[in-house]
């Protein structure tokens, strides 16, 4: 069997194009609904008028207030949520295939723990970076922390031959994550700040509050590039499903592919976490949901997973900012409340089939 034959098994089956189109439509509907809902509910006509006017597709008159709410406040937040959901879903799918571990998620390599170290150093200790302040400072510190954690994991996991065994990588990620968690807890406890724990907890559970256009555009560009790049490795990821030995016999340069995808997913996760915090369950549950419905082929799994993750996180963020009037809850609370029962159902289904 050749790698080309393996890749052919994951091509679009009849009806998959329809599934892609349906998910795109559902995503657009989700975005439109999210733009309507909030502390100030707006009619759909007003939302469409603002969007079409901003895109140069219409000349409808809109009020300054509607324009500010829809275009300046809600649109970047909703687009960032969609990008983050898509990115986390793709990272989860790639890592689950690379490690052949159903419990792998985007935070497998200690990324979230490292980002939390950077964020806590700013929130609690007041550490600074020259020329940065506020949200930019927090994002930069979180990204640097995530990168430091990644480097430490790779140093611990890499063998003398330059190999990157999945089992050792997972264990190194767990160890680094626990070390980062210990640092975070220690700093919060000894800081003596009454609201330190609350602020750190709010960041670690994730939020899209305060996201503006510059951040939203950055996240969208990074995620689109990541999805395209992951699709380029779809055939290799399909080969990994048969095991590393089988993948190597099919002509896959396993070590190079593993290094490339591990570092790529880590960089994407670090970028997402730096701006939005660690949002759980999306990267863990969405790939399993898509595999269950559409099969394991990565030419389907990656794009359909990205769309599904985007839809899920757009709705999770909408619930997070509307379920309690006058108060916003962390989006990670919503994804956990939805993801945990879904994951439990998937486990029970697999147990019955086994």
Image: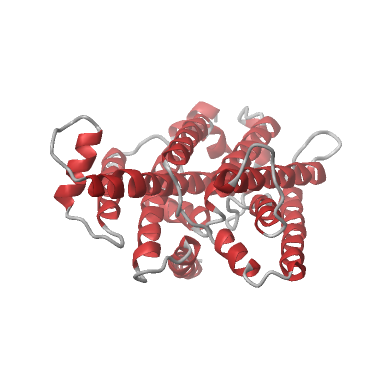
How far across and how far down the image is residue 228, in percent? Answer: 47, 31
Instruction: Examine the image and state in which quarter residue 10 appears.
Output: top left
User: Residue 65 placed where, x, y %?
Assistant: 25, 49
* 160 left or right of 43 in image: right
* Residue closer to the observer: 139 or 17: 139
Quarter where residue 76 is shown: top left
In this view, the residue in front, 61 or 38, is: 61
Residue drawn at (69%, 41%) of the image: 129
- From the viewer's perspective, is 72 left or right of 164? left
> In percent of the image, x 44 and y 51: which residue is there?
291
**In the picture shown, does residue 325 fall above or below 154?**
below
Decide which of 37, 340 is in the foreground and name it: 37
The x, y position of residue 59, in whole percent, is 14, 33
Residue 27 in view of the camera: no
Q: Is residue 298 above or below residue 277?
A: above
- Coloration mode: secondary structure
Compared across the picture, whether 344 is left or right of 72 comes to right
Residue at screen point 48% across, 67% down: 333
Image quarter hosting the N terminus: top right
Which of the 4 image quadrants contains residue 286? bottom left
Among all residues in the image, which is located at the extreme right?
A: 160
Q: Residue 7: x percent and y percent?
A: 48, 32
Q: How many marks?
A: 0
* Residue in the picture at 69% in, 51% down: 118
In this orientation, does residue 162 appear?
yes
């Amino acid at each position: 069997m050749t790698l080309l034959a393996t890749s052919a098994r994951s091509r679009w089956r009849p009806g998959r194009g329809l599934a892609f189109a349906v998910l795109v439509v559902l995503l657009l509907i989700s975005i439109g609904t999210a733009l309507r809902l909030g502390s100030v509910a707006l009619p759909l006509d007003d939302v469409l008028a603002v969007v079409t006017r901003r895109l140069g597709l219409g000349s409808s008159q809109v009020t300054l207030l509607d324009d500010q709410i829809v275009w300046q406040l809600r649109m970047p937040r909703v687009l960032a949520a969609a990008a983050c959901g898509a990115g986390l879903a793709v990272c989860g799918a790639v890592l689950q295939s690379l490690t052949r571990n159903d419990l792998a998620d985007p935070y497998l390599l200690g990324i979230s723990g490292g980002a939390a170290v950077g964020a806590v150093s700013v929130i609690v200790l007041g550490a600074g970076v020259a020329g940065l302040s506020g949200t930019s400072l927090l994002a930069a510190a979180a990204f640097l922390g995530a990168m430091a954690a990644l480097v430490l994991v790779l140093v611990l996991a890499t063998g003398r031959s330059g190999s990157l065994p999945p089992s050792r990588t997972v264990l190194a990620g767990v160890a680094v994550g626990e070390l980062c968690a210990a640092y975070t807890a220690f700093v919060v406890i000894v800081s003596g700040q009454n609201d330190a724990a609350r602020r750190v907890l709010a960041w670690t559970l994730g939020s899209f509050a305060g996201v503006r256009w510059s951040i939203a555009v950055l996240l969208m560009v990074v995620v689109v590039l990541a999805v395209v790049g992951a699709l380029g490795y779809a055939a290799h990821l399909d080969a990994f499903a048969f095991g590393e030995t089988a993948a190597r016999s099919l002509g896959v340069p396993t070590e190079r592919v593993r290094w490339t995808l591990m570092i790529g997913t880590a960089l994407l996760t670090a970028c997402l976490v730096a701006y939005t915090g660690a949002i759980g369950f999306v990267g863990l549950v969405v790939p399993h949901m898509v595999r269950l419905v559409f099969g394991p082929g990565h030419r389907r799994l990656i794009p359909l997973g990205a769309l599904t993750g985007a839809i899920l996180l757009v709705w999770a963020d909408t619930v997070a900012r509307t379920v309690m009037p006058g108060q916003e809850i962390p989006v990670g609370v919503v994804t956990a409340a939805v993801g945990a029962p879904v994951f439990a159902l998937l486990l029970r289904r697999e147990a019955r089939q086994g």
